[in-house]
Image (spheres, grey):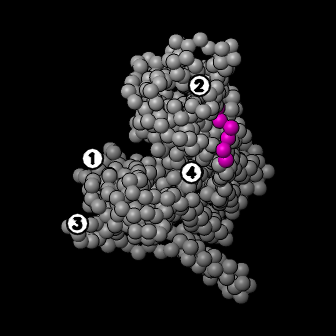
Amino acid sequence: MKEYKLQGLSCANCAREMQTEMQKLDNGEKTEIKFSSSKLVVEDDVDMKSIRRILKTDGASLVDDEEPSSWRPDMKMLVILSAAIFAMTFVLAPVVSNGVIVAMYVAAMAISGYQTFIKGAKNLVKFKFNIDTLMTIALIGAVAIGEWREATMVAILFGLNEYLEGLGMEKARSSMEKLLNVAPKKATLLKDGAEQVVSIESLQKDDIVLVKAGEKIPSDGIVVEGVSSVNEAAITGESLPVEKSSGEALYGGSINNEGLLKVRITKPYEDSSLAKILHLVEEAQEMKTPTELFINRFAKYYTPLIMVVSILVMIIPPLVFGAEWGASFYQGLAVLIVGCPCALILSSPIAIVSGITKNARAGILVKGGVFLEKLGKVDAIAFDKTGTLTKGEPAVHQTKVYDEARFYEISGAMERHSSHPIAKAVMAEVERRSVRMLEAEDVQAVPGKGMAAVIDGASYYMGSEKTVQHLSLSDEQKADVEEMRRAGYTLVLVSDEENLLGLYGVADEIREESRTLIKRLHEAGVKQTIMLTGDHQATADKVAGEIGMTDVYAGLLPEEKVGRVKRLKEGHTLAMVGDGINDAPALATADLGIAMGKGTDSAIETADVVLMQDHLGRLPDAIRIAKRVNAVVKLNIGLALGLKLMALLLTIPGWLTLWVAILSDMGATILVTLISLTILMVKGQKPEAERPLRTV
């Protein structure tokens, strides 16, 4: 398949019709015109001469075409010139003959409407009825009954309408283009001690590149040498710089702020995070929502229906009510103009592109308009706990100490050489207290219990409750153990041969933004927030209570999560949020899968929405934008159909004129375009400043 950039593509309905024509060509079945991104995708062996001919019928062409393209005048200048000639007719009418005025009307019509007239005449011969055909019939009819002034006004207003229609779509496209232009073009490769400027496409895994201050990181990599802060806003949407030093990972497309970095490339550019983001964003523009598909189907029947109504308006009043044929014919022509489906077809794509672009700028990748529409309908969200609502890193949250002198020293001596996550949590607590570090001897792991060691000639034990079965605990100690167990902590007990020295309550640390996140989600219209976890019920209940979740399901295996998601979907539009490989099946099962971008590739590939940050703080904004898009699309459809219905109702008292008809269509087009573009101006609510929360 080959992809070409198009120019002059401003009409969604026309693009759809051209695509249909192209698909009838030999080897053209898979031809696709991507209206939102203004691109053409064709098979390698399709007849490009025929493709160019079809494009030319609507004034479109390939960008950088090898063939010399015909000069295409600027529509804005044509409309201005045509309007100026039309205005002069009012000044000159009292002093020149009627023939001169008619000639000026013809000139004004020809300047702004000749392209439409030519396309419409060709379509009329083929009995192909679209907006160009309707406008051509209306112009011919108006001239035939001597309505020169109104015919000229219709031609000018239609030209202005086409210009504004194209301008609105170009605005949405240019916003997307700016987003896509964040990709770096060149890189400074270090090879055999020499610097060499190369294209980023030529970079291979393990190549070493130099990135100077102000330059973009060419592809995903790891810092080999140097210290600097890096702006990752193009990837994660986070404006604050991130400090990077040797051994730390970098996103391709992020900007090196000040220092000189030597970077080892870990992925070729086409596999980098940035390349995936840009590909996802570009593909997302063209995925049709159910609403768009319905509008396209509706438009196919809408125009022929309007033509039938137009004919009825022309013949019923004279035949049944004795009305004048000329007046009825005029009203019928006005109805034809009302039949233009452009505003209706534009009601969705500009809003969808604007919504996808707005989210992408904030580091939220929505993989298609269909998922953006679903995101705006979500009323229940299920979360995996570990690594999503929590950091996935255990920490000590509570201690009970019975021997202050030995408890922390013995703990440090036994855990200092262990790499187990719980051991690290205990060591962090010990180091925070700056206690004296002892050396442990004869350290042994006790399967299913914990560990034993000899320190200063005495035996000590550390681990679960089974570790201290040799002791007789006091009532106070038993009560403390039971209290911490009920609180959902993982217990780590420390003892010698005769006495319990103390115990640690360890739990996964809640993310700082989780509590405010759930509150903001409820404010954004999400009714149910559900935790799904494999942890014990007490632990899950504690975390859920801390952050305000509405429902908790604990002790779930991965396959049980899938079953629970299926049940939760009943009666809800359910999103599932996760970051681990065990979340992928549940993400795929939910109505909408949402993955955190620093999670596993499996979760990201499976998800429909990807948050490129390592937190969920932007999720409420994504939902608000999606809801705004859905509301705008509904409003646009209502305006497009409402204005046309009002115009059609004017035929009952005989008040519908040609210029009112064209103004109803142009007004709808302008309104749906401007309203759709307001999505780009919506300001997201930044996640609240991170502050330590009381964690469980």
The residue type indicated by label 2 comes to: Leu
Mark-to-mark CA distance, 2 and 3: 60 Å
The residue type indicated by label 3 comes to: Lys
Residue density around tag 4, few if under 14, some if 14–19, many if 20 or more, within 10 Å: many
Q: Position of residue 613 (x, y in %)?
A: 52, 48
Mark-to-mark CA distance, 1 and 2: 80 Å
Q: Position of residue 548 (x, y in %)?
A: 70, 32
- Mark 2 vs mark 3: in front: 2
Magenta highlight on residue 485: no
Occupied quadrant, residue 157: bottom right
Residue tagged 4: 359
Residue tagged 2: 501
Q: Which residue is located at x 54 percent, y 68 percent?
A: 113
Label 1 vs 3, first from the N-terminus: 1
Label 2 vs 4, first from the N-terminus: 4
Residue 254 vs residue 592, the one in the foreground: 254
Q: Which residue is located at x 25 percent, y 52 percent?
A: 44
Pick the quarter of the image with the C terminus. top right
- Magenta range is 691-696
Q: Position of residue 226 (x, y in %)?
A: 39, 64
Residue 395 horizontal side relative to residue 478, left or right? left
Check disc 4 and report its element: helix, strand or loop. Answer: helix
Residue tagged 1: 27
Residue tagged 3: 191
Q: Is residue 21 visible in the rendered structure shown here?
A: no
Q: Is residue 465 visible in the rendered structure shown here?
A: yes
Label 1 vs 4, first from the N-terminus: 1
